[in-house]
Amino acid sequence: IAAFARSGRHDAGDRAEELLQRSLKLYREGQDRLKPDSITFISVIDALAKQCHKAYIEAKENRAARKAGDHSVIEKRIQNLLSKMQEIHDSGDDHVRPCTVSYNILLDLYAKTSQADKAEQCLKFMNDSCRNGKKHMKPDIISYNAVLLALSQSSRKNDLEKAVNLLKSMEDGSLPTEISIKPDTVSYNTVMNGLAKSKQSGANRQVEEMILSMEERYKNGSSQAKPNIISYNIYIDAWSRSGDNDASNHVEEILEKMIHSRDVKPDTISFTSVINTFSKSADKDTPERAQKIFNSMQSLGVQQTRYTYNALINCWSRSGRNDAAERAEEILLNMTQLHDVSPDSVTFSSVIHSWAKSGKSGSGQRAERILDLMENIYKSGDRNVKPNKFTYGSVLNSWAKSGDDDSVENSLKLLHRMEEAYKNGNDDARPTVPSYNAVIHAFARSNSSTKASDCEMILNSMLESHHNGNIDAKPNLQTYATILNACAYTSPQYSTQQEKSNAFKIARKCFKAILSGAYGQPKSSIIFNTFILACSNLVPPGNKRDQLIASVFDECCNRGLVDTRTILTIRRVSSLSLKRELLDEARLINGFIKSDDIPVQWRSNVVEYK
């Protein structure tokens, strides 16, 4: 039975319980040597609990529970065994009785299967039983730590607050137990971790108070509450997740304190978390501060892992600095030369994203060069650097935003490369909406007189891909808005009448698609202003143009999305008679204009007024 309990087999609990039942049967038939005792039952309960947890994980991952069985059924079998133990004990057999250890296994299972309510009930039952004379059921620190874990991990409202209050009750000795149970390091770490990962405002301050309480108790002689490396790493994590403007300074102070501490020295996780916190800071000097901390790891003998390098790259990438992409790429290239640390897909993707964000001339070429390096490393056998749709998408963005003369040509080539790879079975190269939108954006930024038709060509590719089963290729509001922009800014000077006519047809089709609401509702005047501009640039002056602009303006008014930009656009592109028709009554035809000058019903849904 013990061997099955330790085996890790999917049916370990089933087999252990079968052996227990055989043992009971043979004992009843007269074989006294096979009489099971408490240890036998506890071993079976332990095996079933492990099997139950595995079944829970499988169900959570939406996989069939296979031979492991439904976790709730296995849980019921554990409860039945505990009842059986009590029944045997009540019949006069002192060798079998449920005890703290057996119920701690159940409590641990409740914690691991997100059943905080059952954990609370089980602890109450143990306390009640103890008060009624069953001292063998008395909860211990393990019992309380299991309940703290269940409450701290729970998604139920107020459960985390219950965990904090239970910890306080343990601290001040107000638990419903005969013997005081003081929280140990595990108790504090469990609740602090729950707070750190919560989205509660002020959670970082609560964690700080608990750390100070631990330090005070340890200073006063309580070694069981001594903060360890896990405690301080949770402390750093709480500040890192807090969103506090001063978080980077706080984590740096914590790290400095750990470096000079006799008891707890920072490890790789400590340094990596601090560097990661810097990446969220708006301070201009954070990349240098992060680099300094990164460099200090070597002198302190702390290992720099892939995650540490990724955090440093992320710090540069998010900094917005002019040299961010170059510095991020430099770190990546240094990694490729190391023997003990190698880059992964996250590393490469972060650097490519840095180039996409930079918008610099040549950024597309630099990003694609990194992609080529990534593909070569992957082909050589390193499965950790497999490019995916996000990697390709970032390279496309790099080309689209670079503004280089060959950006359109190269982004289109890469998109075709992705489509071909996807058709040949490489799902990681599957083009997504951001991929297609990046190429459309590249066309929209170009000076080509046919850019409206080119954008429509990409839109048709998206629709075809979506129709053929690529669920990630369905166009969105941004798709149509970008194409509309491309149409509006088709040069009236360098385009033929046929090209302008075709661009207007595409613009009208996109505008109707947007107004249909099938791709989301427009939340500002931009769509309307852009189509008004398209009418002005692409439709010859006259009644038809005036009627189109008037109808678009009416629609914008009806939706309550008119802002100062709309009024200025109407003033700039409309004929005098149309301006009078649309703006004279509201006294907006000329002069300086403020938002409050616009009639309330016209601007009722503009965000700044909501």
Image (cartoon, rainbow, N blue to C red):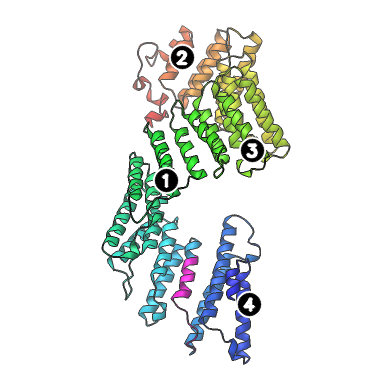
Horizontal side, residue 512 vs residue 357: left or right: right
**CB contact under 8 Å: marks 3 and 2:** no
Whole-percent x, y for residue 136 in the image:
41, 80
Residues under labels 1 and 3: Cα distance? 28 Å
Disc marking residue 18? 4
Q: Residues within 10 Å of mark 2 (few under 14, many from 20)?
A: many
Q: Nearer the viewer, mark 4 or mark 1?
A: 1
The residue that appears at 57% across and 29% down in the rendered structure is: 367
Q: Which residues are magenta?
A: 93-109
Residues under labels 3 and 4: Cα distance? 52 Å
Would you say residue 9 sits in the magenta stretch? no
- Secondary structure state at the residue bearing disc 4: helix
The residue that appears at 32% across and 56% down in the rendered structure is: 210
- Which corner quadrant of the image does residue 141 belong to? bottom left
User: Can you see residue 432?
Assistant: no
Viewer-proximal residue, 474 or 350? Answer: 350
Q: Could you tell which of marks 4 and 1 lies nearer the N-terminus?
A: 4
Disc marking residue 377? 3
Q: Could you tell which of marks 3 and 2 lies nearer the N-terminus?
A: 3
Disc marking residue 313? none
Type of the residue with mark 3? Ile
Q: Nearer the viewer, mark 4 or mark 2?
A: 4
Whole-percent x, y for residue 426 in the image:
69, 39
User: Can you see residue 25?
Assistant: yes
Disc marking residue 271? 1
Image quadrant containing the N terminus: bottom right
Identity of the residue furthest to the left in this view:
220
Identify the residue under disc 2: 570
Type of the residue with mark 2? Ile
Q: Could you tell which of marks 1 and 2 lies nearer the N-terminus?
A: 1
Above or below for 422 versus 398: below
